[in-house]
Image: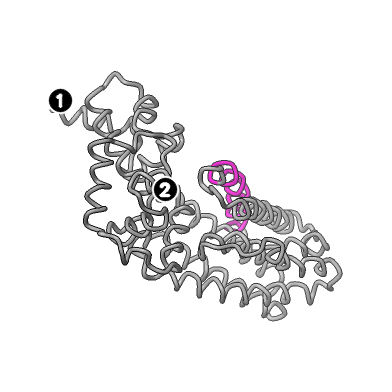
Amino acid sequence: MHTLALLLTGFSVFSALLVALEHFRGDNYKGQLLAQVMGVLLLLILAGLQLSHFAYLQQGSLFIHSPVYQVLLFAVAPTFYLFSKPLLQAQTGNPLLQLLHLLPILAAPFLPFSLALPLAFAIGAGYLLWLAHSVYALRAQRSYFQWELWALGSVFVLALGVMLMGLSLPLVSEPLFFSLYASAIGAAFVLVNLALWHTPRLSTEVEEAARETYAVSTLSNVDCDAMLTRLANLMDQEQLYQQTELDLPMLAAQMELSPHQLSELINTRLGKGFSRYIREYRVEAAEDLLLDKPSMPVLSVGMEVGFASQSNFYDAFREMTGMSPGQYRKINKLQVAE
């Protein structure tokens, strides 16, 4: 357990830095500044905790008994709440009122260690109940990202196990507890990385699903079949997906719908979010270009079909096909040759 904990601790520290740099880009969190800032802050907090655990497990450092460690410990749950609320419920509320969730952190440095740990996990239990309720509320949208919900559910189970251990800390030896705690955080990072590998724009899709879950239908006076036909024509005939700057409001204006009406139409009738809908068109067009123009550089293919950057193109292509654009071209060229 000790060796596994050290390995997972090291993995989670490097993973936190990579996810902060790669996933928390502006195009993944448009209009969600609070979620973006809190997401990066959460990763830094978890990295700080894991560095503390590594120092304790490897060198016997007692930094885990310091006020700084207690601040990090108390910060995890409210920071996660402030990060996930805009995504899971498609709302933020008053930003200043939301920041009141951080108030318990102010008391953390002054608490005795024997009280700080169980109290931090007790507070975390309340946030876990909120998380369970929020994830359960998205059950109607599970067909859009079923695998990712399982990953999130697994993270919830890990967090629940850690919380129970934290509440019963006097019954568990300190070395065993911190080995298990460090391993649980590391395992959570493994699950998060798998989810982001499978669905690079997971945050966007969760937010779109949440928006439909909590919204009142706006399609009662809309001829949905006619609108779907018009939408298909805009994509297939006019190829609007090639416009790099295309977003939900722009496409909605083309169809003389409100952004929410178009979002609901795509979600309820096509079973996917707007961003995935556009990515599918772009990737399908890229597949054709990769084969029809074998000398065209891969990056040029991505730009031609509407992707704004190489990383967005590669992420979307891998998400849809399970391979990189270069691999797709190579494999299909070999099949044609045979």
At mark 2, the secondary structure is helix
Residue 337 - label: 1
- Check residue 180 for magenta coloring: no
**For the point 22% across and 54% down, which residue is it?**
226
Place of residue 115 in the rendered image (x, y in percent of width and height, measured from the top left): 78, 77
**Looking at the image, which is closer to me, 163 or 169?**
163
Cα distance, mark 1 to mark 2?
41 Å
**Looking at the image, which is closer to me, 19 or 240?**
240
Left or right of 329 on screen, residue 132: right
User: Circle 2 is placed at which residue position?
Assistant: 248
Left or right of 196 on screen, residue 32: right
Q: Amino acid at mark 1?
A: Ala
Place of residue 178 in the rendered image (x, y in percent of width and height, measured from the top left): 67, 65
Q: Is residue 321 above or below residue 79?
A: above
Left or right of 116 on screen, residue 184: left
Magenta stretch bounds: 3-23
At mark 1, the secondary structure is helix
**Looking at the image, which is closer to me, 119 or 13?**
119
Q: Is residue 324 above or below residue 260?
A: above
Q: Identify the residue at the far top of this view.
A: 295
User: Which quadrant holds the N terminus?
Assistant: bottom right
Count of labels in the image: 2
Place of residue 51 in the rendered image (x, y in percent of width and height, measured from the top left): 70, 53
Counting other residues with Cα less than 10 Å from the Cα at mark 1, is it few (<14), some (14-19), or many (20 or more)?
A: few
**Looking at the image, which is closer to me, 258 or 48?**
258
Of labels 1 and 2, earlier in sequence is 2
